[in-house]
Image (tube, grey):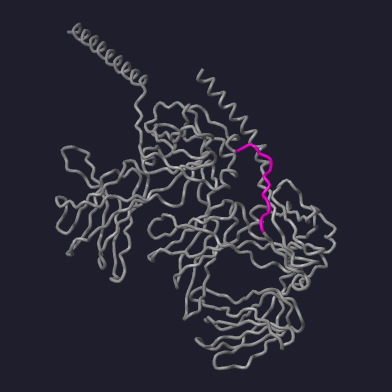
């Protein structure tokens, strides 16, 4: 009967997977309706915003504009064309110098629609503030930048020689340098402006993102950044910090499925740079990234010997988006509806205007529309939930498991449970982890490896005078569990100026009659030569299963003993993503020797498991030791009894044979 039940569960699981594949192909987001306020009657241009990108299909094929009577309003998506990136060089004309300023202007020869200027041929290094103006007749000037900064600092690896601005029709562009706190610059060798011959691109789409500081090992800072939605076309993250000088390596990563396990995947890596001269700032604080697929990413900064980098703001930069061009007969508000992924891109007669809409039309005569409030969110028909799609796992034989921990209750749906140090120490390299319900049915999960560590505060080292040498201090250091995985151990001290050799060892007794042997684990030099700063933490690498009782040996030389602070242990972090189907009790089972890692069909639903935010639940603090099964104990007793009986019979037969030989 037990085997029959097992195969029945397997068959049900396969049926659910087949249904899940169909459900996933038909899954849709909520349909959103938002107000669109035209800038006036006639042609209008509407910029794509983050909320639209978060709810619509990637190519905006599901976007529909509706009038008050429900009639569809035609629109065009005007993409930026390659021909719009042509540059025209201008004739350079010097400006009259004053005590506090100098500069030049360029003449493009005729009125042209431009949106960016670029200079070259200035001697480096320099860091200058500039006022940028533009005009069509040299009599009336439009201020493009009141105070911008241009710089070329080769030693710091920083350069910015381009300035962008709102597209406009200009012939003359004027640069006015501020010479109050820096030397004068000569005329540049070349200045060019970028022309826009086709549709004007919208301004860069930016969005400030919420973030939180996460636990990290010494010498690193980690931040978790929350994105507005999964799969957004984000190309970079701009960091703002309060530090005046920055030179640190930084990377951005997200969770990706690798085989049957979720691991951090690097999206981008760069060296952050920032310098401040007087009140001028030159920086390169953006991390270019590949488009993320998750709703969360992690920023890791290598601090080196510096204080942890404190972020004040994270800004997402999105890929270039198109204008939405439409024509309003009366200027009344419209409705934008999107989110129905099954729709195909519309085709309107307005398409005939695509080739005639130039930059001049979009920059001047075409009104600028805007999005208004959300009117209504329409829910699509209910699809098969991911919990129903996954189903239940096979029944599990609980014999042989040594530990059991209850998983705290939570709402139904996708959740994650963090593995603590007890599980890491008691598990067989995470291969024996199983989640079961009250009927001993398995709950499928995906193992996720996290970038941030699990941090444990250890008891302070205990001095051991009986083991100390003439110029050594020896301390007993206790780890919380035996069998922990490879980890990092750090020490702190209140000392200011010192240099010590510090060794970490463990004692082993191979022969009871011999004194214990000291087996080396790691050795480091601990140095601080700056009395004005705190000493850096000392870090040791611990191999897996280092034991519980360790010895810390500090070579003091002729100095007084170094005062040690509380040690910290940095363990690798893991969690299990699984689907809670109901309010049934769940347990985490582990500690069974010889068990291989499980294989669940949940990995087939990785896009659904990875693309959503995952609330975390905890394990109960009490670890329950499971007794051996009664049948197993009885079998063990019978086995040894029979073995002893056989040995007695063999010894009796051997004795009789020996007597006959005599």
User: What percent of the width, then of the height, locates residue 280?
Assistant: 50, 79
Farthest residue, direction top: 660
Is residue 234 shown above or below 13? below
Is residue 614 shown above or below 642? below
Q: How many marks?
A: 0
- Residue toward you, 242 or 263: 242
In this image, 387 relative to 52: left or right?
A: left
- Residue toward you, 631 or 654: 631
* Residue drawn at the location 58% of the way across and 85% of the way down: 177
When asked about the image quadrant of residue 530, the answer is: bottom left
User: What percent of the width, then of the height, locates residue 241?
Assistant: 47, 68
Q: Based on the picture, tell me whether residue 324 belongs to the magenta stretch.
A: no
Is residue 504 shown above or below 16? below
Q: Based on the picture, tell me whether residue 375 belongs to the magenta stretch.
A: yes
Q: Which residues are magenta?
A: 373-385
User: What percent of the width, then of the height, locates residue 331?
Assistant: 78, 64
Q: Quadrant of the C terminus?
A: top left
* Residue drawn at the location 46% of the way across and 52% of the way down: 451
When asked about the image quadrant of residue 143, the answer is: bottom right
* Residue drawn at the location 50% of the way across and 51% of the way down: 264
In this image, 591 relative to 39: left or right?
A: left
User: What percent of the width, then of the height, locates residue 286?
Assistant: 54, 66
When asked about the image quadrant of residue 54, the answer is: bottom right
């Amino acid at each position: 009967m037990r085997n029959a039940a097992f195969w029945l569960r397997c068959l049900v699981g396969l049926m659910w997977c087949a249904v899940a594949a169909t459900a996933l192909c038909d899954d849709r987001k909520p349909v959103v309706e938002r107000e669109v306020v035209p800038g006036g009657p006639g042609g209008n241009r509407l910029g794509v915003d983050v909320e639209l990108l978060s709810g619509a299909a990637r190519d905006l094929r599901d976007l529909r504009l509706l009038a008050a009577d429900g009639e569809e309003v035609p629109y065009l998506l005007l993409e930026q064309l390659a021909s719009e990136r042509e540059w025209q060089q201008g004739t350079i004309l010097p400006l009259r110098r004053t005590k506090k300023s100098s500069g030049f202007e360029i003449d493009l020869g005729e009125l042209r629609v431009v949106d960016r200027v670029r200079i070259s041929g200035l001697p480096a290094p320099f860091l200058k503030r500039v006022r940028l103006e533009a005009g069509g007749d040299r009599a009336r000037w439009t201020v493009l930048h009141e105070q911008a900064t241009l710089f070329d600092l080769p030693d710091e690896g920083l350069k910015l020689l381009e300035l962008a601005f709102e597209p406009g029709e200009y012939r003359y562009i004027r640069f006015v340098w501020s010479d109050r706190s820096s030397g004068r610059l000569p005329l540049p060798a070349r200045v060019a402006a970028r022309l826009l011959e086709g549709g004007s691109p919208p301004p860069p789409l930016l969005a400030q993102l919420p973030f939180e500081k996460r636990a990290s090992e010494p010498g690193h800072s980690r931040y978790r950044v929350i994105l507005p939605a999964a799969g957004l076309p984000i190309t970079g993250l701009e960091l703002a910090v309060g530090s005046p000088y920055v030179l640190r390596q930084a990377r951005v990563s997200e969770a990706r499925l690798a085989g049957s396990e979720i691991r951090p995947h690097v999206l981008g890596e760069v060296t952050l740079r920032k310098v401040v001269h007087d009140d001028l700032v030159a920086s390169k604080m953006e991390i270019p990234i590949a488009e993320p697929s998750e709703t969360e990413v992690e920023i890791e900064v290598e601090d080196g010997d510096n204080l942890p980098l404190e972020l004040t703001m994270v800004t997402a930069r999105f890929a270039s988006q198109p204008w939405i061009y439409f024509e309003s007969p009366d200027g009344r508000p419209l409705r934008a509806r999107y989110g129905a992924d099954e729709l195909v891109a519309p085709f309107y007669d307005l398409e005939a205007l695509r080739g005639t809409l130039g930059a001049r039309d979009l920059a001047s005569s075409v009104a600028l529309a805007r999005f208004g409030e959300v009117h209504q969110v329409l829910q699509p028909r209910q699809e098969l939930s991911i919990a129903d799609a996954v189903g239940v796992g096979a029944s599990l034989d609980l014999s042989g498991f040594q530990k059991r921990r209850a998983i705290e209750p939570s709402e139904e749906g996708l959740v994650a449970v963090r593995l603590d140090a007890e599980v890491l120490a008691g598990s067989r390299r995470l291969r024996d982890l199983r989640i079961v319900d009250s009927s001993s049915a398995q709950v499928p999960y995906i193992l996720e490896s996290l970038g941030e560590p699990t941090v444990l505060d250890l008891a302070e080292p205990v001095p051991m005078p009986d083991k100390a040498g003439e110029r050594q201090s020896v301390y007993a250091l206790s780890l919380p569990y035996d069998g922990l995985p490879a980890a990092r151990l750090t020490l702190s001290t209140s000392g200011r100026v010192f240099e010590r050799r510090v060794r970490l060892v463990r004692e082993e007794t191979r022969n009871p009659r011999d004194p214990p042997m000291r087996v080396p684990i790691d050795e480091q030099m601990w140095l601080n030569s700056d009395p004005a700063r705190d000493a850096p933490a000392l870090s040791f690498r611990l191999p897996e299963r280092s034991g519980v009782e360790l010895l810390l040996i500090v070579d003091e030389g002729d100095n007084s003993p170094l005062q040690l602070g509380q040690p910290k242990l940095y363990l690798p972090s893991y969690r299990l993503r699984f689907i809670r189907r109901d309010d049934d009790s769940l347990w985490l089972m582990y500690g069974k020797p010889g068990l291989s890692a499980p294989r669940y069909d949940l990995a087939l639903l990785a896009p659904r498991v990875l693309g959503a935010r995952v609330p975390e639940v905890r394990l109960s603090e009490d670890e329950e030791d499971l007794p051996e099964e009664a049948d197993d104990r009885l079998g063990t007793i019978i086995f040894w009894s029979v073995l002893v009986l056989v040995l007695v019979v063999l010894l009796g037969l051997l004795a009789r044979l020996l007597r006959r030989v005599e």
